[in-house]
Image: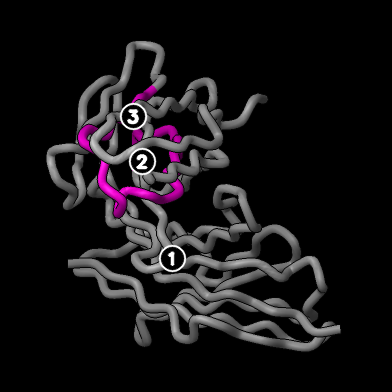
Amino acid sequence: AQSVTQLGSHVSVSEGALVLLRCNYSSSVPPYLFWYVQYPNQGLQLLLKYTSAATLVKGINGFEAEFKKSETSFHLTKPSAHMSDAAEYFCAVDTGGFKTIFGAGTRLFVKA
Amino acid sequence: KAGVTQTPRYLIKTRGQQVTLSCSPISGHRSVSWYQQTPGQGLQFLFEYFSETQRNKGNFPGRFSGRQFSNSRSEMNVSTLELGDSALYLCASSLGILGGDGYTFGSGTRLTVV
């Protein structure tokens, strides 16, 4: 069965520092992978997705993620954190079974 | 274009009552999925509908049900509410024809059961 593991429920970075949010997946078939962001009292917003084209995927707000099949990872990065990036981030996998599985989420704190 | 609309935004219900939540997807999206979000369990999949047919269902009791109408709008119903049903219920729409579309989420309905 497919699953998603996000390492670290909380990550804290200083403004201007690198953001790295980790995601590992388990899937028996080539997956579609996603990162979503959720701001307080809102729904989730799609940041980026991997659909087997390029392994390095660029998304909105300067985020990108790299699909590494050998490591079953899809980590999210941003070179320079901004205060407005503070939110909860979810990694998700869709294996085509009309169902997307979400990780537990990582809350990102950005310090001034 | 208009986003995914969920109504109502907030609900307070008493144990034992039932509740119906509504979701209007983005125009042209035929798939609607529902998730329950709680601090302890995270995002849990409830069900997915495409062209009025339920294609997948999560591991929830039969008190949770849903349906989709011919215009792709969807409703979910929870009967005999329990305190543990308090959660944010999120609706997400997608084209639904192939995997990998990604979802567009609504802002959710916050259900509180007292």
Q: Which residue is mark 2?
A: B34
Horizontal side of A64 relative to A103 (left or right) equals right
Q: In the image, B60: left or right of B102?
A: left
Q: Which residues are magenta?
A: B74-98
Magenta-colored stretch includes residue B78? yes
Mark 2: which amino acid? Trp
Tell me where residue A29 appears, x and y as whole percent. 23, 64
Residue at horizontal 65 percent and vertical 67 percent from the top: A87
Give the amino acid at mark 3: Val
Report, in whole angstroms, how far the alpha carbon at label 2 lies from the one at label 1: 17 Å
Q: Position of residue B104 (x, y in %)?
A: 53, 41
- Residue identified by numbered label 1: B39
Toward the viewer: B88 or B15? B15
Report the residue at 33% width, 62% height from top: A31
Residue at left 43%, top 25%?
B22
**Image quadrant containing the N terminus of chain B:** top right
Q: Quadrant of the C terminus of chain B?
A: top left
Q: Chain of mark 1?
A: B
Assign a secondary structure to mark 3.
strand
**Residue A57 falls in image quadrant:** bottom right
What's the CA distance linking mark 1 and mark 3? 21 Å
Closer to us: mark 1 or mark 3?
Answer: 3
Answer whether labels 1 and 3 touch (C-beta < 8 Å). no
Q: Alpha carbon of mark 3 to alpha carbon of mark 2: how far? A: 15 Å
Tag 3 residue: B19
Badge 1 or badge 3: first in the primary sequence: 3
Circle 2 residues within 10 Å: few <14, some 14–19, many ≥20: many
